[in-house]
Amino acid sequence: MAAAQIMILAGEASGDAHAAEFVAALRRMDPEIRFSGMGGDAMRDAGVDVFFDSSIIAVVGLIEVAKHWGDIKRAMAAVEQRLERDRPDLLILVDYPEFNLKMARHARRLGIRVLFYISPQVWAWRPKRIHKIGALIDHMAVIFRFEQAYYERAGIPVSFVGHPLVDKVPSSVDAAAVRARLGFAAGERVIGLFPGSRQSEIARLLPLMFAIARGMRAREPGLRFVLPVASTLDAGDIERRCRDAGLDIRVSRDDIYDLIGACDAIASCSGTVTLEIALLGTPMCIVYRMSALSFAIMRRLITIPHIGLANIVAGGAVVREFLQRDATPEAIGAELFRLLDDAQYRREVIAGLARVRENLGEGQGAENMARLVISLLEK
């Protein structure tokens, strides 16, 4: 019997990482499976034949998508061509819903089965999409327990596999050792500046992060700052921009969990990274900026009170969110200082973050996903 062929489409860094994890689990269960897809370095390292680099199209926001529409169309054409040529046994779509659902439609025309991993946020905005999604896929794999009920009510085959971060994120980090490696002296207070992994996030948030650092250091000259750089970004370019801004910020490609654990407080972009920070219990605030038009449209569509995953999963506002015009360096700097200096407030935030871990499942998310894939292939 010929080895199974699986195509995986991951449109950004977090999806690339999650895909690589379940690919590794699948290889342990069936070493003969062959993988191709759209992704990044993590999928390549896991042995996937990556035929299109997803960092080219890793943008967020309606205006940003319009600006990169030529690249997105090129990616769609490349995927459609490979689907027609290879006819994989299963197409696995990882998050990135607007792009991936278009590819799901093409796969359905070709008779290729489709598994969607990491559900679009139908519980947050455009809930009626769930019926369109159900018509385009064969199965949904969700990573938040509360999502399962949405698909069951709509009659769509669904499995809760758990969040892969529960296994991936360590319970603690040797903060002193990491700080020493970064060149920070004992007793120095460290602020994390996490602008994101997409080029569009860097364009909007990096200048804000610089302004936050400048304002906080004016108040406390001894503060240190660390800025992680995702594999999708050019670390040298970020370092040059820090120097041009006249700021001493430690730019690092070190393990993201080491960096989170080494920080006393973090200003973070919205996204999966807020769950990683929450799982390690580092106090944070969430910063979100996009084009005014994109935000105005999104605000009319969103049906929940929070945009940060940490708050959504915790079931309430456990960390502050600074959105659009409210995302000023003065306000964010004041919140970070409160997280550093107000002991009672800091304890309350950390207690709230503990609820995130409780609501993400018991672990083994990648293995659960791999077992689901095997069961679909066997059918």
Image (cartoon, rainbow, N blue to C red):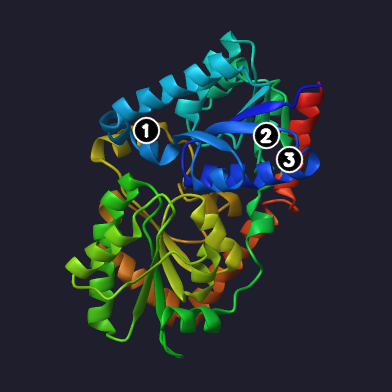
Please, what secondary structure does the residue beneath circle 2 have?
A: strand
Whichever of callouts 3 and 1 sits on the residue coming sooner in the sequence is: 3
Q: Local crowd at mark 2 within 10 Å, few (<14), some, or many (≥20)?
A: many
Which one is in front in this view, the residue at disc 3 or the one at disc 2? 3
What numbered label is drawn on residue 252? none
Measure the alpha-carbon separation of dots 3 and 1. Answer: 41 Å
> In percent of the image, x 52 and y 20: which residue is there?
82
Residue 5 image offset from top left, x and y in percent: 67, 26
Question: Nearer the viewer's eye, disc 3 or disc 1?
Answer: 3
Q: Quadrant of residue 234?
A: bottom left
Is any atom of residue 237 visible in this view?
A: yes
Residue closest to the eye, 48 or 207: 48
Rendered-image quadrant of the C terminus:
top right
Mark 3: which secondary structure?
helix
Kindly identify which numbered label has been placed on residue 26. 3
Q: Are the two marked residues, 3 and 1, in contact with CB atoms closer than 8 angstroms?
A: no
Residue 320 screen position, x and y as percent: 43, 60
Residue matched to label 2: 141
Q: Regarding mark 1 in the picture, which secondary structure is present there?
A: helix
Please report the residue visible at 71 percent of the width from the left and 29 percent of the height from the top. 158
The residue beneath circle 1 is 300
Distance in Å between CA atoms under marks 2 and 1: 28 Å
Q: Are marks 3 and 2 in contact (CB under 8 Å)?
A: no
Amino acid bearing label 2: Ala
Q: Amino acid at mark 1?
A: Arg
